Each structure stands twice: as structure tokens, then as C-alpha cells.
Amino acid sequence: METKALKPETRLIHAGEPEPLIMGAVAMPIFQSSTYACEGGDDYSRLKYSRLNNTPNHDALHQKLAAVEGGESAIVTASGMAAISTALMAFLKQGDHFLAQNCLYGGTHGFITVDAPEMGVEADFIDGNDPESWEQKIKPNTKLIYVETITNPLIQIPDLEKIVEFARRHGVLSLIDNTFASPVNYRPLEQGFDLSIHSCTKYLNGHSDIVAGAVIGNRDLIERITHKLNRLGGTLDPHACFLLHRGMKTLGVRVRRQNETAQAVAEFLERHPVIEKVNYPGLTAHPQHDRARRLFDGYGGMLSFQIKGDVDRAEAFIEKTRIPICAPSLGGVETLITRPSSTSHSGVPQEERLKMGISDNLIRLSVGLEDADDIIDDFNSALND
């Protein structure tokens, strides 16, 4: 089905579906085979083989991902970090330099500060909201700029439009981790970014039962990443492809509901006297609220906040809540709560964490599909206990 003119929610359901349906099956079957008969030709990358990410389950998923974000092509990986690291390695070599936002997911930060230097690649961190300072850090060997749509865990929104302009002006690639926003709320390729990256473990799958990643972009760029991935071996297995393919079909309704609930929870927390600060772009007090309102179709299901007091007070609150599960991931149907300093960013040295603004009593919340009033009542009891 031609899906370019359809809304994202419709594309999520119909894009990439086999035509005609395989044996009439409405749901994409699982092709649980590692090996396929040769079809001729001498191009190794065209052999049907699970490690090469080109089985029927991979192909259907790639087409759906590309269509949803307006890309020409896509590739799925064994994890979000496999997508991030492979994409960076596909375009960086010894002696190269790149720019990265100064507040990123802890795993990404670790790759940039530990693994990249070991490969002879240099990086400079930039303030995503200070475009003038970027010019001071560009170098003749700068190859790309890397940011997050909504930063983890401070929920900041960089100057996305200026990043695209900057990348084009200097002839460097623009890569963005769009996990927190999801294609329902923001589609980076439509706004001029070269590559959009996802930890599909989160919103795209939405059910906390697989680990996966994806990169979406034009055909030539994705082909380079695919060749690199084929050598590194970070392949997504067919059954996980099936689960991700299925999960994406409900992404629209899930994210719209999570947008609404997160807004209500953020407004409640903002009013509560025990809460020191709430980070959520749907609040007018958020420093990038106007930007989010202009660029996004929704503010997302992620928020973070600080309770007045120390880390023990934050831990006590988490322990008193009944609905959220204390767990490090996000984007699922269940509400998850965590302290980033002890989970997602525990690998970042404390001095660097504090410099980013990630205090030990910062709490991150991934809003699920529970009733908003139930979550608020639960939080109110835990805060007032």
C-alpha cells in the first residue's frame, strides 16, 4: 500500500505489510529460519541470512520504520546502543572529530568518552541551546553532530532547527536519537535531520519484552550503516522483529494516551509544595516549552522531577508509591520510576553527572497507560505520607 500521504498512525499499521498477504495471514508470520536458499548473484550483502538483517521479518519492519518517519530506508539492530554505536562508527574513523550534546543517555555518553577515543576519534560536547558556541568547536575534520530530541533524563529540547541549519552549513551529518519523542510526536527526517535513531526497546515496541534499535534515513546512508552492522553482527532475531512489528501498530494510541497522562501528572507535581522542580516540555515554565509547542505533535510520556531534600527522601518516595515499577527502562505500558544516578547514568562519573545537572535526588518517570487519576492519587499519598 502507498502510505506517503497517510498520517503516522495509519502508516504504523499499514506500511511494510506484505502484498499479497502471506497465505492470507493478517499478522506478519515469524520466519524462524537463520538460513535461506541462494537466489543467485555474487553480492554477499544480498544473500538471505539472519545476520545480514534481510529476512522477511527484517524487510517488513524496515519498510514500516522508514515509512513512519518519512525515510527512504531503515535498519534494525539488536539494541538501541547497537544502533547508536554502529551509526557513529559507520561515519567516523581514526583522526575524525564530531560534536555531541552535553546531556545524553549514559550509554551514549560512555561510548563518546571511552570507546570513541580508543578508536582515535575525538569529540567535543556542546550546549544544545547555545548555537553561537557551536561555531567555536567546529573543526576541519568534524564529520557529524549528534543530539537527542528530548534529553535523557533532564527532558531538555535542543535548538533542533538551528542544529539542522548548522549541519548543512558546515557539510556535516546530523544524527538524532528520537527515542523519547517517538515518530508520533516528532519526525526528524521531515525536519531536515539526516539520520533518526531509536531504542526500539522503548516506545516503538512498548511492551517491555524485547531489546532492539533502529536507524532511519536515506538509502545511501543506511546502506553504509548496514554494511558496518553486518560485520559487527548486532542483528535483531526474527522473533524480536515480529514483536516490534506488532508493537508499532499500537504506538499511536499508546503515545497519545501517555502524552495526556504525563501532562496531568506534571501539572500535579508542579503544584505540590514538596516538589522543587519538574522537567516536562508541556509545562509553560519549561525553558523550551514554546519550541516544543511549535515543533512537536505532543510533549511525550517522559518527565523528571526533584523532591525537596536529599537522596534518602527521593528513595523514600519511590518506595512508598504503589503503581510505578522501579526499573531502569521506559516507554512501556506500565509506569516506571527510577533515579538516573543509580541506573541509566550510574556509569557517568559523579562530577560529570552533576555538571550535566543530574543530581542524586532527580527522579525520572516513564508514564504508562494506567489511569491518570490513579497515578496522581498514588503520588499524592506517597508525597504526603
Image: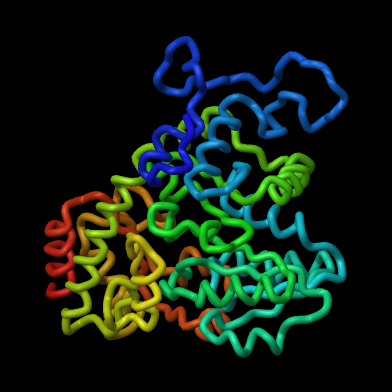
- Residue furthest to the top in view is 23
Left or right placement of residue 5 versus residue 378 in this view? right
- Residue furthest to the front in view is 5
**158 or 114, which is in the foreground?**
158
Q: Quadrant of residue 101?
A: bottom right
Residue at the spot 49% in from the left edge and 66% down from the top edge: 149
Q: Is residue 152 above or below residue 67?
A: below
Q: Is residue 71 above or below residue 342?
A: above
Q: Quadrant of residue 340?
A: bottom left
**114 or 258, which is in the foreground?**
258
Left or right placement of residue 12 versus residue 38 in this view? left
Q: Report whether residue 337 is seen.
A: no
Q: Is residue 101 above or below residue 324?
A: below
Left or right placement of residue 149 versus residue 270 in this view? right
Q: Is residue 223 above or below residue 56?
A: below
Percent position of residue 80, x then y: 57, 52
Percent position of residue 339, x then y: 39, 69
Percent position of residue 377, x then y: 12, 63
Residue at the spot 21% in from the left edge and 62% down from the top edge: 321
Percent position of residue 320, x then y: 21, 65
